[in-house]
Image (tube, helix red, strand yellow):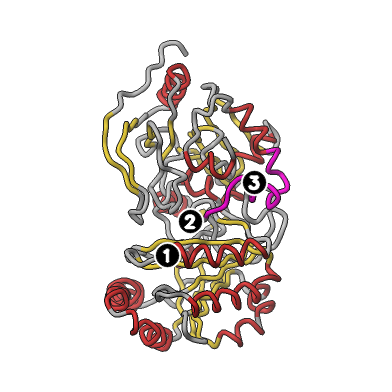
Amino acid sequence: MSGRTAPPGVTSSWSNWAGNQRVIGDALRPSTVDEVVATVRAARATGRRIKPVGSGHSFTAIARADDQRVDLTALTGPVRVDSGRRLITVPAGITLHALNEVLAGHDLALANLGDIDAQTLAGAISTGTHGTGAGYGCLSTFVAGLTLVTGTGELLECSADRNADVFAAARVGLGALGVITEVTLNCVDAFVLRADERPAPLVEVLAELPELVGGNDHFEFYWFPYTDRVQVKVNNRVPADDRPLPRFRSWLDDDFLANSVFAGACRLGRAAPALVPTISAVSARALTARSYTARSDRVFCTPRRVRFEEMEYALPRAALPEALAGLRRVIDELPFRVLFPVEVRFTAPDDIWLSHGHGRESAYVAIHQYAGMPAEPYFRAFERIAAELGGRPHWGKLHYRDAESLRPAYPRFADFLAVRDRLDPDRVFANSYTEQVLGA
């Protein structure tokens, strides 16, 4: 232990993907677990703070370092695959994209994913990243074990059978409990999905919601503001990849239309706000039905190159119609226009203390605004509606809640704080965001 030294720091600038969080400060890039331990111990000894940083795909300040930031992308470590038990152990700084490729090479997969794969694994689980599907919780529910360096410099392994209270807290730990160095995940055999996508009236989708959510492996929809139209996306497991999407259609839909053309439409709407309702109506009508099969992660994950800011709330599933009705009123009354569709997804209950889905079936409502357009009045207005309905904000998406308002939303909030007090008594991992949502 005594021979470990922290890696040298360099001063550099950092910003997240959306560009709304920026900082200039010391950056550390440990490449071994020993260096992580030394980094934490040095920070504690000198009264400094450190903040692990992933790929910058959170919109909140959760990864913004007030002092030193720690980049884990160089963290080395073996990849261990137990195909018989369907387990994989990987360094925490691996991206979901790289993880998916490793899993595919062993005929394994994650049972569910969100719609982007650029995040580091540690960042994804620490914020409660999720996909959609009535039978699945957030990605953190796949975690079978993890190792973290605590605020006292201790290397701690936890699982359901070992340090179980830490395990219940650290799977969605907000970066407040330690530096995650290694994660073991429960996997499934590799599988193929059939994607079925179609436009539909919003009223029809809401009327059929129980069947759509319960009758499909993965269901979500996008509502286009100023219209009564949605785009429905359904993914179900099938035995064979027998209907691949032609390469040209894939490029046309997922690259050209979803990114290049949509970016142009957003720029036009920003320059001429009066045109936004027409643009939204045209976009809703322009999307056509399509059905195809592909490897699971290639259906779940799609490229996102149009920059935006986002808020997302997990609501009790029964509250979704009321939340959407309130959201429509908010959008109609705003003094500016909303350029992005609203995404709605569904998850199963879980037992992770600070998971948005803790103890209940959830409907997630994600609202977005194009970069450079006003967003805060829109987000605050929807947050008031969501909070009154028992909503919990996504830790990586913009929100304005504090510890006082969040405490009653999470039954195990006090337990999480007790684990934090034990693992990081000197608040080595604190920053402005953790002080906001967990208290000083």
Residue type at numbered disc 1: Ala
Q: Is residue 215 visible?
A: yes
Q: Are marks 2 and 1 in contact (CB under 8 Å)?
A: yes
**Start and end of the magenta stretch?**
400-415
Q: Mark 2 to mark 3: distance in Å?
A: 17 Å
Q: Earlier in the sequence, mark 1 or mark 3?
A: 1
> Height in image: 73 above or below 293?
above
Picture coordinates of residue 302, whole percent (x, y) = 40, 65
Residue type at numbered disc 3: Glu
Q: Residue at x 61, y 69 (%)?
A: 217
Magenta span includes 406: yes
- Quadrant in the rendering for residue 268: bottom left
**Looking at this rendering, what residue extends furthest in the top direction?**
2
Look at the numbered disc 3 and give the secondary structure of its residue: helix
Disc 1 target residue: 375
Disc 3 target residue: 404
Disc 2 target residue: 398
Q: Earlier in the sequence, mark 2 or mark 3?
A: 2
- Quadrant in the rendering for residue 216: bottom right
Look at the numbered disc 2 and give the secondary structure of its residue: loop
Picture coordinates of residue 95, whole percent (x, y) = 41, 48
Relative horizontal placement of residue 172, taking residue 408 as reference (left or right): left
Q: Residue at x 56, y 51 (%)?
A: 128
> Height in image: 5 above or below 67?
above
Q: Are marks 2 and 3 in contact (CB under 8 Å)?
A: no
Residue type at numbered disc 2: Leu
- How many discs appear? 3
